[in-house]
Image (spheres, rainbow, N blue to C red):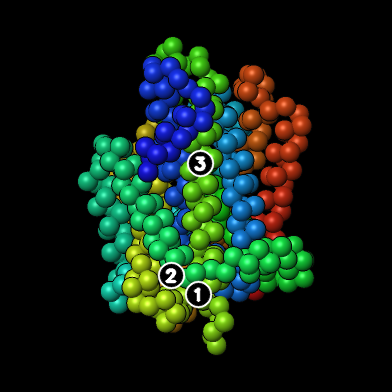
Amino acid sequence: MSSLVTAITLGRAGFSQPGLRQTLRRLVGPGLLVAVGYIDPGNWATDIAGGTGFGYSLLAVVVISSLLAMAIQSLVVRVTVATGEDLASLTGRLLPRPVAVLSWAAGEAAILATALAELVGGAIALRLLFALPLQAGLAVTALGTIAVMLVSRGHAGLQEKLVNLLIAVVALSFVALLIAARPDAGAMVRDVAHAAPLLLQDHGALLISLGILGATIMPHNLYLHSGLLAERLRDMPGPTRGAAGAALRTATGDTVLSLSLAMLVNGAILVVAAASLTGGTVAIASLDEAHEAMRLVLGGAMATVFATALYAAGQSSAITGVLAGRILTRGFRGRESRTWLRGIITRVIAVAIGFVLTTQRGGESPDTLLVLSQVVLSLALPFALVPLVAIAARRQVMGRFALHPAAVLAAAAITALIVGLDLYLLRAAIAG
């Protein structure tokens, strides 16, 4: 899959010099690793809720959220190519110390919340596949991630290939589910056309839409993307560093294509839910109920495909979450942490939190923990997004790649919109 993205990215950018193409090829790949965060179990929960509750209408929200994510991740690329540094390092070096400390703490909270969502998603998948108790599934999923990190220690290329394989499993699974669900194209067009009136009239649809937005744009992805790209820029030969424009086009193309794939997967999740999980006598309120409804409507084989894809999505996101943690520590502390050790510590803490919360909640659906993780991510996002825009606007830092005043206003408006919507979602979650 990464080779396909490489070919399309370099081909569209118009690079014909063999030496330049070979060097720029190194910049293709971080986009796919970042795209993993856009199809994690938190996205599944919000997409399925949107599809089962409101048909195809919120497909428009998936597209808009994905376009916003592309714009923000492309800004990450711009800052990284212009400076040669990752966002965590830039935040720690350029912004006031209190801001840097808060950004670091918020980033760590986001990574821990994501780890919890990945473990819960994996545990639900194992329960659906093998009837494994939820708490045992939390431990098994954590051990699986730790085993992968230990086996691939010192081989970043192996980790990337494994993530690409897991993304392929998710994508192909939903191709099969789409074929089986046979969505109504006419109904899809009608529902999407009425999305705006629905959001204005139905508070529930608005809240789910905000959940889709919050699950799409994740703060630790900003650090992960800039860190991976900065590493590859540092490894490039000296002469190529002058070809910053070519590097920017290549990395931006990688980002847009990879997040387009994530958008298609998220759209497929919502479409499958709308096509196969609506019209029943019981509302779908959890991944377990979605799996059971899918088994009844599409058959046991498709339900198994659904659960397998859920586990693959959680495990791939877990790997990239560990990588994001390493980059965060290196940027704010100034020294590298051991990826495998950090992965173990994060998983142990997340499993402990998962055990405590599932014990306290008794028979309550574990999907509520996915919602909790999205609330934490919503709170953490401004602490990464605001520094990103502030740095991108500094001409003394960005040089000729600094945002123009109109672009700064647009970026600030998008940031204010996202932060405002996240705060509104948080207030609604607390009130509920």
Q: Check disc 3 and give the amino acid type.
A: Leu
According to the picture, the residue beneath numbered tag 3 turns out to be: 257
Coordinates of residue 287 in the picture (x, y in percent): 46, 72
Q: Can you name the residue that lies furthest to the front here?
A: 186
Image quarter hosting the N terminus: top left
Q: Can you name the residue that lies furthest to the bottom here?
A: 281
Say which quarter of the image contains residue 408: top right
Q: Could you say whether the residue bearing mark 1 is in a helix, strand or loop?
A: helix
Determine whether label 3 and label 1 are within 8 Å by CB: no
According to the picture, the residue beneath numbered tag 1 turns out to be: 276
Q: Check disc 2 and give the amino acid type.
A: Ala
Whole-angstrom CA distance, mark 3 to mark 2, is 26 Å
The answer to whether residue 383 of the structure is visible from this angle is: no
Q: Check disc 1 and give the amino acid type.
A: Ser
Whole-angstrom CA distance, mark 1 to mark 2, is 9 Å
According to the picture, the residue beneath numbered tag 2 turns out to be: 180
